[in-house]
Image (tube, rainbow, N blue to C red):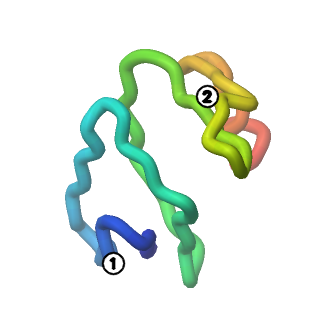
């Protein structure tokens, strides 16, 4: 899995994003399982950097279960 700030994650790697972390794109070159622990909302931004969507843990869990 790669993104433009953190670089490449390999099997067994651990990552941490501080509050307010921002990145444009995260890609997985192969099927990837991510264990995500979050506290507070997850926001998406539009091209101008304005919040255009936000969800909490319930929304993240619902998305994960719908795509499992």
Q: Is disc 1 placed on a helix, strand or loop?
A: strand
Residue 43 sits in quarter: top right
Taking the image as drawn, is residue 62 in sight?
Answer: no
Please tell me which residue lies in front, 44 or 47: 47
Q: Residue at x 25, y 38 (%)?
A: 18
Disc 1 vs disc 2: Cβ atoms closer than 8 Å?
no
Q: Residue at x 71, y 51 (%)?
A: 47
- Where residue 67 sits: x, y (%)? 75, 48
Left of 26 or right of it: where is 68? Answer: right
Q: In the rendered image, which residue does mark 1 sit on?
A: 8
Is 27 placed above or below 19 here?
below
Residue 65 sits in quarter: top right
Taking the image as drawn, is residue 22 in sight?
Answer: yes
- Where residue 32 sits: x, y (%)? 51, 67
Q: Residue at x 25, y 54 (%)?
A: 15
Which of label 1 and label 2 is nearer to you?
1
Q: Is disc 2 placed on a helix, strand or loop?
A: helix
Mark 2 crowd level (few <14, some 14–19, many ≥20, 10 Å Cα): few
Image label count: 2
Mark 1 vs mark 2: which is more N-terminal?
Answer: 1
Mark 1 and mark 2: span between their CA atoms? 25 Å
Q: In the rendered image, which residue does mark 2 sit on?
A: 61
Mark 1 crowd level (few <14, some 14–19, many ≥20, 10 Å Cα): few
Left of 53 or right of it: where is 44? Answer: left
- Identity of the residue furthest to the bottom in this view: 29
Please tell me which residue lies in front, 40 or 37: 40
Left of 22 or right of it: where is 45? Answer: right
Is 35 placed above or below 10 here?
above
């Amino acid at each position: 899995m790669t993104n433009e700030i953190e670089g490449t994650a390999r099997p067994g790697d651990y990552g941490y994003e501080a509050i307010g972390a921002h990145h444009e794109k995260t890609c997985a070159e192969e099927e990837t399982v991510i264990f995500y622990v979050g506290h507070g909302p997850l926001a998406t931004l539009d091209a101008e950097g304005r919040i255009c969507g936000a969800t909490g843990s319930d929304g993240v869990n619902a998305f994960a279960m719908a795509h499992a």
